[in-house]
Amino acid sequence: MQIYLPIAELSMNVFLVLGMGAIVGFLSGMFGVGGGFLITPLLIFVNIPPAIAVATGATLIVGSSVSGVLAHWRRGTVDVKMGTVLLLGGIAGTGAGVWLFQILQGIGQVDLMIYILYVVFLGSVGVLMLYESVKAILRRRAGRPVRRPSRHGLAHKLPLQLRFRRSRLYVSIIPPLLIGFGVGALAGAMGIGGGFIMVPAMIYLIGMPTSVVVGTSLFQIIFVSASASMLHAVNTQAVDVVLALMLLAGAVVGAQFGARMGGRMQGEQLRAALGLVVLAVGVGLLVELVARPGDLYEITVLGS
Amino acid sequence: MTVFRLVLILLFMGQAGSALAERLVTDLSERQIAITSNFRGTTLLIFGAVQEGSVFEGGLADNDIVIVVRGPAHDLVVRKKERVAGIWVNKDAVTFADVPGYYAVASNRPLSRIAEPDLLDRIGIGLDHLSFKVEKSDVPEDMIPAFREAIIRQQKNALLFLSTERGVTLLAQTLFRANLMFPANVPVGDYRVEVYLLKDGRIVSAQSSPLSINKTGIERGLYTLAHEASYLYGILAVGLAVLTGWVAGLVFRAR
């Protein structure tokens, strides 16, 4: 069964789209990330033009984060105040990201930039997560207590300090603003919500307790990816709403299975598994960047 | 461009009389192809007849029929990848003007046997005889053909450039028919279907009919909205995504 995508201007198999949505949803339910880092490369892999993959990915993440944040909201694990600070940085960052995306689209290097950003971020985040989680697993095996990350980082020394009750923190708002900006820029340029960068950054750089990190990250990702979607809709007209909604339909179902599976696993095992997935996607993209392309020429339509 | 081509066609039709247009009667199975949500490509039947009087000037030579379908033209940038520090990067670019988004040619026998390359070049019949105007180029003249060939190669792979040398069936020298394929990713817009009657390597009659391929219904509405009311479209897209996520969250909590 084929469905015609009005913005991408090609037709795709419905079950393929639902299946891709389900895979992404499964991972996002399991690990509490939006899943954008996976969907954009997947879409590009099935011949969706990169610009549309990025913009549509952002719209998908809006929906999947709303669905995810509801569960955390009920458990009270969303720090709205911290989320808002991250968001302020995030909105500014998104504008910068979409702007960068458009400049690179003009000079024909947008694919390259997306690839390089992905390889760098997926590679480094994957390696760090694997390293940290494997160490934690070994420590647990050896019977030693799992050490929690330091609570006295940079955020405690800088000015403009605020109290965040949910996170039980009294820290400067400068690091969260910068982190929000950076993740927002990535969201705009890469079509991701940035969960896989935001989550480690909140734990290790801001020192938030792990329990509120995922919910808070999802909370602010809703707004960042919504504004990224809007900016893409207005500036590049590359959001394919039919594709986004079909992916979302697969994703919300997949997320339920993912959440159940995730509930049965230990934190370190989960982080190790996510690290592996992230690293695998990164390595796959690196291979494509370095391997000789099948056709050395690339064609872009400029309009009539 | 089209007017220019018509003038050329008339010039190449030689000394044949004034009632030329009547020698060829053609029609299409559809004048409008509608792209709906389950569109997965289509075929178009082009058929017609060569009228009696046209077997002229001794009538020794056989009739040849060539059909060309040209899609809406766009400017294209072709970029060549080069290895920089181990990574493949887009380097030199050539911009071509008015490249058809779809191009199909069908004939009753190989084009090289129907007419001289010179004639085919001038009217742009056959993939080897298509020329694109270079608008801007980073490379010396002699490297441009490689960029031009890249367009033809990739469009052929995408089934958007087609050439079928025996695609036209000619019955008793008078009736002809051809099926042309349009893939699912066919560009939308105004097409032209050109039918040429050749004799002894000369065009003795030609007909051109319009064909339109367009999205209909909700597909058309969404596309128009995205391009003409992009704020509204963005709000709609984000709103629908939020709603879907919200509903899903509520539905699965109930379980």
Image (tube, coloured by chain):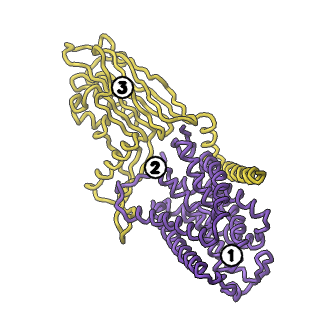
Q: Which chain is purple?
A: A
For the question of whether residue A95 can be seen, the reply is: no
Can you give x and y, in whole percent of width and height, for residue A90 in the image? 67, 69
The front one of A69 and A223 is A69
Can you give x and y, in whole percent of width and height, for residue B92 in the image? 36, 61
Residue type pointed to by label 3: Val
Q: Residue furthest top?
A: B52
| Quadrant assignment, res B249 | bottom right
**Marks 1 and 2 close (CB-CB < 8 Å):** no
In this rendering, which labeled residue sits more in front, label 3 or label 1?
Answer: 1
Residue type pointed to by label 2: Val
Which residue position holds label 1? A177
In this rendering, which labeled residue sits more in front, label 1 or label 2?
Answer: 1
Q: Secondary structure at mark 1?
A: helix
For the question of whether residue A47 can be seen, the reply is: yes
**Classed neighbour count for the residue bearing mark 2: other residues with Cα under 10 Å, few (<14), some (14–19), many (≥20):** some
Image disc number at residue B195:
3
**Classed neighbour count for the residue bearing mark 3: other residues with Cα under 10 Å, few (<14), some (14–19), many (≥20):** many
**Marks 3 and 1 close (CB-CB < 8 Å):** no
The image shows residue B97, relative to residue A178, as above or below, that is above
Q: Which chain is yellow?
A: B
Q: Are the residues flagged by discs 3 and 1 from a single subunit? A: no
Can you give x and y, in whole percent of width and height, for residue A227 in the image? 67, 60
Q: Estimate the spatial distance between the alpha carbons at disc 1 and disc 2, rounded to whole Å.
A: 38 Å
| Quadrant assignment, res A70 | bottom right
